[in-house]
Image (cartoon, helix red, strand yellow):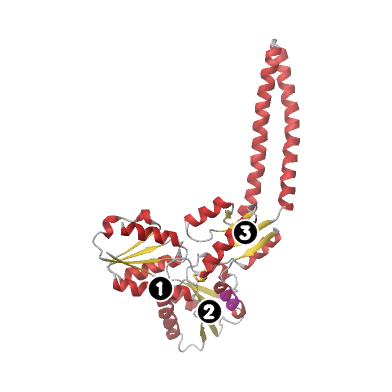
């Protein structure tokens, strides 16, 4: 069996920078270090960083919930303590007092006293916790996908020290969109729910549309005309398919040919993605089975899988070596391997090792 491994398989520059940067941050101090969203779409990498001390939060409001959870825990713990104390006190009391009347009095009195003490104790603990929270430095790591403009403001309001690992390629898109947003309608190619695009949209102003598939084009062009803007900017998610980018941009140009709209097309697909997609296509054409390694929720991995399916007779998508079905590969004489931008090198090595065995 011959195995061809893509030269561009694995971590890209932006992901490597973010993951290594996050590792360095926890090395310096592993307390109060948060990351907004998964740093990469790879469960193992996230788990590893979690074990080292990074807390992953979905949004800054869930950080608030963390404080609330701490408060609830304090209250619950204190209530539990007080119940246990009451029980102990009562047991002690009932040993000493044998008369029922006295037991009743003791029970009520003890409960009242402990309730008073517990309330005070809870209040003090919460105050202490809030004081501690506001004094300690909190770090917020921004992953390579970037975040919306408003989230930076919110993080500053919450006194986070921002450690920004937004990939420079993504920052470049934010800058282009922000510069053009006032007199251009913006079309962004990509998935509307992808974190990178959620960030980019915040720089696009009010006049924008997101196109993921061919069927979204008509609706977007209707909105372009309704906006009455005479300038159109086309940009793209960094990991969008280059084939679709070229096809859809050409189609839009044709459809707007006589509409007196100036069209500016900026291919913002990152070079690392473009080269990786090209290499995937080339290898796919040479082999009889293509294995794509990467997170199933990773956009760039999914694109590689689509390319492999299109250009190779058989393609499979796996997250790690354990997902290899040996029956699926038994007849393959030439296997190609490519991995998404969020796949660590060890995962690729593990797959190769299992195939060679
Ligand atoms: S833009 Fe390119 S280099 Fe940057 S994180 Fe995304 S895939 Fe990686």
Q: Earlier in the sequence, mark 3 or mark 2?
A: 3
As measured in the structure, the alpha-carbon distance from the residue carrying label 2 to the one carrying label 1 is 36 Å
- Residue at position x 45%, y 85% in the image: 253
Q: Residue furthest top?
A: 99
- Tags 3 and 1 touching, CB below 8 Å: no
The residue under label 3 is: 25
Callout 1 secondary element: helix
The quarter of the picture where the N terminus appears is bottom left
Q: Is residue 284 left or right of residue 68?
A: left
Q: Is residue 44 left or right of residue 175?
A: left
- Tags 2 and 1 touching, CB below 8 Å: no
Q: Residue furthest left?
A: 331
| Residue mark closest to the camera, 2 vs 1 | 1
- Tags 3 and 2 touching, CB below 8 Å: no
Mark 2 C-beta to ligand 1 under 8 Å: no
The quarter of the picture where the C terminus appears is bottom left
Q: Which residues are magenta?
A: 172-177
- Residue 237, numbered circle: none
For disc 1, the neighbor class at 10 Å (few under 14, some 14 to 19, many from 20) is many
Callout 3 secondary element: helix
For disc 2, the neighbor class at 10 Å (few under 14, some 14 to 19, many from 20) is few
- Residue 277, numbered circle: 1
Q: Earlier in the sequence, mark 3 or mark 1?
A: 3
- Residue 226, numbered circle: 2
Q: Earlier in the sequence, mark 2 or mark 1?
A: 2
Foreground of the two, 312 or 176: 312
């Amino acid at each position: 069996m011959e195995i061809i491994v893509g030269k561009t398989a694995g971590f890209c520059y932006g992901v490597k920078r973010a993951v290594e940067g996050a590792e360095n941050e926890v090395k310096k101090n592993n307390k109060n270090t948060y990351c907004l969203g998964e740093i990469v779409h790879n469960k193992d990498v996230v788990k590893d960083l979690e074990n080292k001390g990074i807390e992953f939060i979905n949004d800054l409001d869930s950080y608030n919930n963390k404080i609330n959870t701490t408060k609830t825990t304090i209250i619950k713990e204190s209530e539990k303590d007080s119940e246990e104390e009451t029980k102990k006190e009562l047991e002690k009391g009932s040993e000493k007092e044998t008369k029922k009347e006295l037991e009743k009095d003791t029970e009520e009195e003890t409960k009242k006293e402990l309730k008073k003490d517990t309330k005070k104790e809870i209040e003090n603990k919460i105050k202490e916790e809030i004081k501690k929270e506001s004094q300690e430095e909190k770090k917020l790591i921004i992953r390579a996908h970037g975040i919306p403009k408003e989230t930076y403001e919110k993080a500053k309001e919450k006194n986070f020290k921002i450690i920004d690992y937004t990939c420079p390629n993504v920052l470049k898109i934010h800058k282009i969109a922000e510069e053009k947003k006032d007199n251009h309608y913006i079309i962004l190619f990509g998935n509307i729910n992808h974190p990178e695009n959620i960030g980019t949209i915040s720089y696009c102003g009010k006049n924008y549309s997101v196109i993921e598939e061919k069927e979204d084009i008509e609706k977007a062009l209707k909105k372009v005309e309704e906006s009455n803007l005479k300038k159109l900017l086309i940009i793209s998610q960094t990991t969008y398919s280059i084939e679709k980018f070229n096809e859809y941009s050409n189609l839009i140009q044709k459809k707007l040919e006589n509409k007196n709209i100036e069209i500016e097309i900026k291919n913002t697909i990152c070079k690392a993605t473009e080269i990786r997609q090209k290499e995937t296509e080339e290898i796919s054409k040479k082999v009889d089975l293509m294995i794509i390694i990467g997170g199933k929720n990773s956009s760039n991995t999914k694109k590689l899988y689509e390319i492999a399916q299109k250009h190779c007779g058989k393609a499979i998508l796996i997250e790690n070596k354990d997902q290899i079905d040996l029956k699926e590969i038994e007849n393959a004489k030439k296997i190609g391997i490519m991995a998404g931008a969020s796949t660590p090198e060890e995962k690729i090595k593990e797959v190769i090792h299992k195939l060679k065995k």
